[in-house]
Amino acid sequence: GQNIDQPTEMTATEGAIVQINCTYQTSGFNGLFWYQQHAGEAPTFLSYNVLDGLEEKGRFSSFLSRSKGYSYLLLKELQMKDSASYLCAVCDSNYQLIWGAGTKLIIKP
Amino acid sequence: IAGITQAPTSQILAAGRRMTLRCTQDMRHNAMYWYRQDLGLGLRLIHYSNTAGTTGKGEVPDGYSVSRANTDDFPLTLASAVPSQTSVYFCASSEVGGSSIEQFFGPGTRLTVL
C-alpha cells in the first residue's frame, strides 16, 4: 500500500529552527510537495522536490532523498505566523497526490 | 473572482438528502480535483478531471459524483448523504492534469451530515 508518515505535532520556539520529517512508500514517484495549511484555511504550496538534494527558498528549505524515501522541511528564524500544519504529499505513478496527515507546528514565544 | 471559489462555506444536511458542492476557478486551469479532509487523515482524492468533458475516480469516490461541462466549473454531488460524509471538502486546480504540478486550493466547504 501507499503510505506517507510525518509527526503529528511539533513545538518550537520563536526565532529557532525546526525540521519536519516525512517518509514515504508509494507506487512510483514523480515528486514530493510540501504545503502549509493554517487552521480553517486551504493548503498553500511551499515547495516541490523531484531530484535528490536541498531546495532553498527564503526561510524555508526542503530536502529529498529518493533512495531513502525521505524528505524534510526546514524552517529557520521561526515566526509566530509559522504556526500551521505542514502537509507532505507525493505524486505517484498515476500523477495523483498521496497526502500525509500533516504535522501541526506550534510556535511558542 | 480571483482563483478558486467554493459554495457553500458550510452546510448542515440531513442524512438521505441530495447536496451539490460548487467549485469555480478563473485561472483557466485544465485539471480540477475534489478532496475531503478528515481529522487525523491526509487529504483524500474523491474525483478529478484532467480536462473539460472528462472525469476520473480517486481514492474514495463511492457516494459522490462529478461533472465537468466546461473549464471553469466542477460540481461535486452527494446523491444521498450519510453521516460518514461529514468532512471538509476542498476543490483544487492545476494548469495541467496527469503531471506533477502545483495545485491551487479553494477555501473549502465544511459539511455536516446528521
Image (cartoon, coloured by chain):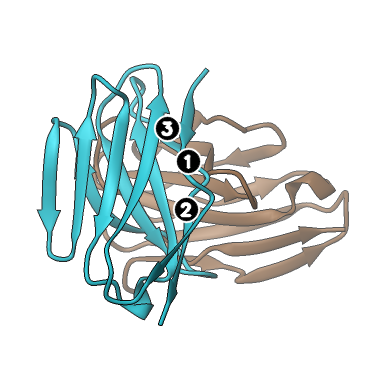
Chain colours: A cyan, B brown
Number of residues whose C-alpha sits closer than 10 Å to that of mark 1, classed few (under 14), some (14–19) or many (20 or more): many
- The reply to whether dot 1 and dot 2 touch (C-beta < 8 Å) is yes
Q: CA distance from mark 1 to mark 3?
A: 27 Å
Work out how far the residue at label 1 is from the one at label 2, CA to CA, in angstroms. 9 Å
Q: Residues within 10 Å of mark 3 (few under 14, many from 20)?
A: some
Left or right side of B54 for A30: left
Q: Which residue is mark 3?
A: B54
Q: With respect to residue B50, does B13 lie above or below?
A: below
Q: Amino acid at mark 3?
A: Thr
Instruction: Confirm or deny contact between disc 3 and disc 2 (CB under 8 A).
Output: no
| Residue in the image at 35% along x and 34% along y | A90
Residue A86 place in picture, x, y as percent: 40, 55
Q: Is residue B81 visible?
A: no
In front: A5, or A13? A13
Q: Secondary structure at mark 1?
A: loop
Visible residue check, residue A37: yes
Q: What kind of element bears circle 2?
A: strand
What residue is shown at x 35% (from left), y 54% (from top)? A35
Out of A17 and A51, give the one closest to the viewer.
A17
- Asked whether the residues under marks 3 and 2 belong to the same chain, the reply is no
Look at mark 1 in the image and give the residue it sits on. Answer: A100
Residue that numbered label 2 is attached to? A103
The answer to which quarter of the image holds residue A48 is: top left
Three-letter code, disc 1: Gly
> Which residue is located at x 33 percent, y 66 percent?
B3
Residue type beneath disc 2: Thr
